[in-house]
Image (spheres, helix red, strand yellow):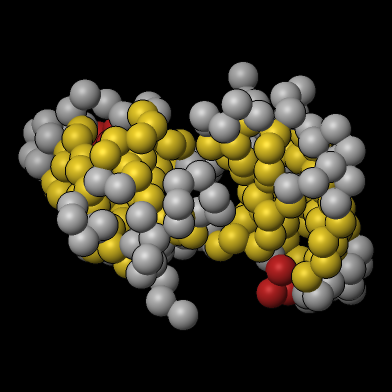
């Protein structure tokens, strides 16, 4: 079965640079969630979209923004990167809003 | 303060042993999910429990949702080395607004 696809899988950036992470949900899933997971921590919810509209907002910094496109894929844009932004970023998708979430393999962002 | 607490935080056992890990909250949850996560990978959904008192079995894994929908447990029978990983419980609180994770139980099954 098709799963959530994230790209890139690994990303290395310098401080103050920008980064864009992409997420392709499971086919027919209309809801996308973004999470940040630091070393040894549980995933922290950043933001979610349902039918291309922002549905919930968590602990997403103002330097980050995200959107969901007409084909339901989503992009997380991160600007003015800081060392503390180094983490695993997961995207998850679900069908019809708040149901079980299926996670992608993650993007490991390293900020130097 | 975590909305979901998990215990134990770490667990190391021998292959073939049984174990139970717990997920607790002072809040009511409309549903709870259990995930297993391996290092550097995304959490993989194992099960969703919805009804208070519900018991679900997935091969050697047995999941239970408390009657009051405030707690859940995961029991593994005859653990195998392939069960090693981080077990996370997660769910929406009863208002359906916040999807939260517990801190996880890191299980290590030794051969």
In front of the other: A28 or A12: A28
Residue at the spot 56% in from the left edge and 53% down from the top edge = A100
Residue at the spot 21% in from the left edge and 61% down from the top edge = A71
Rendering coords of residue B68 (x, y %): 85, 32
Rendering coords of residue B49 (x, y %): 74, 51
Q: Looking at the image, can residue B104 be seen? A: no
Residue at the spot 91% in from the left edge and 63% down from the top edge = B18
Rendering coords of residue B43 (x, y %): 53, 57
Q: Looking at the image, can residue B71 be seen? A: yes
Rendering coords of residue B1 (x, y %): 62, 19
Task: Say if A87 sits above or below A27 in the image.
Answer: above
Residue A102 appears left or right of B9: left
**Residue found farthest to the bottom:** A1
Residue B94 appears left or right of A29: right
Residue A57 appears left or right of A76: right
Residue at the spot 18% in from the left edge and 28% down from the top edge = A63
| Quadrant position of residue A25 | bottom left
Task: Say if A81 sits above or below B39 in the image.
Answer: above
Q: How many marks?
A: 0
In front of the other: B10 or A58: A58
Task: Say if B54 sits above or below B68 in the image.
Answer: below
Task: Say if A69 sits above or below B77 in the image.
Answer: above
**Residue found farthest to the top:** B1
In front of the other: A85 or B60: B60
In which quadrant of the rendered image does the C terminus of chain A lie? top left
């Amino acid at each position: 079965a098709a799963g959530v696809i994230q790209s890139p899988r690994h990303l290395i950036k310098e401080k103050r640079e920008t980064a864009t992470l992409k997420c392709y949900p499971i086919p027919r899933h209309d809801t996308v969630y973004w999470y940040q997971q630091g070393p040894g921590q549980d995933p922290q919810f950043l933001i979610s979209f349902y039918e291309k509209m922002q549905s919930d907002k968590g602990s997403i910094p103002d330097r980050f923004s995200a959107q969901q496109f007409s084909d339901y894929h989503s992009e997380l844009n991160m600007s003015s990167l800081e060392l503390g932004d180094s983490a695993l970023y997961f995207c998850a998708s679900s069908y019809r809003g708040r149901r079980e979430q299926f996670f992608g393999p993650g993007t490991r962002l390293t900020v130097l | 303060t975590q909305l979901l607490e998990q215990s134990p935080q770490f667990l190391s056992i021998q292959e073939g042993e049984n174990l139970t890990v717990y997920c607790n909250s002072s809040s009511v949850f409309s549903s709870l999910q259990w995930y297993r996560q391996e290092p550097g990978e995304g959490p993989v959904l194992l099960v969703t429990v919805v009804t208070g008192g519900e018991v679900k079995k997935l091969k050697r894994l047995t999941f239970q949702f408390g009657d009051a929908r405030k707690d859940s447990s995961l029991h593994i029978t005859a653990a195998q080395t392939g069960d090693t990983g981080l077990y996370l419980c997660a769910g929406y609180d009863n208002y359906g607004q916040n999807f939260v994770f517990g801190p996880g139980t890191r299980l290590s099954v030794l051969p």
